[in-house]
Amino acid sequence: MGRMCAHPDPPEPFRTPELFDECRMVRARGELDLTTMTPLVHALGDARTGCGRVFLIVDLREVTFADGSILQPLCEAWDDCRARLGWVRVVHRSRGIELVMLDGGVLGRFPAYASAQDAWQGTLAVT
């Protein structure tokens, strides 16, 4: 996981990072619910430490179950990264995660990416 430094001349918001190493990545596994979210919440916070833009990829491909408790930490990361002229992109292949995003009203904010490489490049997963 690379760390990104502040740019002296910030380019347009929400651009693709110049190097994949500019991205920070958080991976989650297993079940994500109210009782198991703490490690993900801490990882999302740790990934946003420091100054400058943050491009954050959240890889949920190994998540076997997720409920609505994933929404608040993801939205907090989204708000922080956007305020810093970056982005958050979520990698997953789960219809269940998609339904949680849809039900939470954030599917447009967190569309699915098939891989970290696709998320970095902004290539949405084909549904």
Image: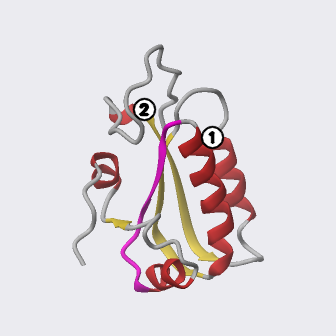
> 67 or 11: nearer the eye?
11
| Residue type marked 2 | Glu
Q: Residue at x 54, y 85 (%)?
A: 103
Please state the extent of the stretch shown in magenta in the rendering: 85-95
Q: Vertical placement of 50 versus 44: above or below?
A: above
> 11 or 43: nearer the eye?
11
| Residue occupying the far front of the picture | 12
**As drawn, is 37 to the left or to the right of 62?**
right
x then y, percent, for residue 114: 30, 65
* Disc 1 crowd, CA 10 A, few/some/many (<14, 14-19, 20+): some
Give the Cα separation between the discs numbered 1 and 2.
12 Å
Q: What number is the disc on residue 28?
A: none
x then y, percent, for residue 41: 70, 58
Q: State yes or no: residue 65 in magenta.
A: no
Q: Vertical placement of 40 versus 5: above or below?
A: below
Q: Residue at x 47, y 13 (%)?
A: 8
Counting residues from the N terminus, which is met first, the one under dot 1 or under dot 2?
Answer: 2
Q: Which residue is mark 1?
A: 48
Q: Residue at x 62, y 70 (%)?
A: 71
| Residue type marked 1 | Arg
Q: Quadrant of the C terminus?
A: bottom left
x then y, percent, for residue 80: 63, 45
Q: Quadrant of residue 33?
A: bottom right
Q: Which residue is mark 2?
A: 22
* Disc 2 crowd, CA 10 A, few/some/many (<14, 14-19, 20+): some
Helix, strand or loop status at disc 2: helix
Q: Vertical placement of 63 versus 48: above or below?
A: below
x then y, percent, for residue 69: 68, 75
Q: Vertical placement of 119 versus 94: above or below?
A: above
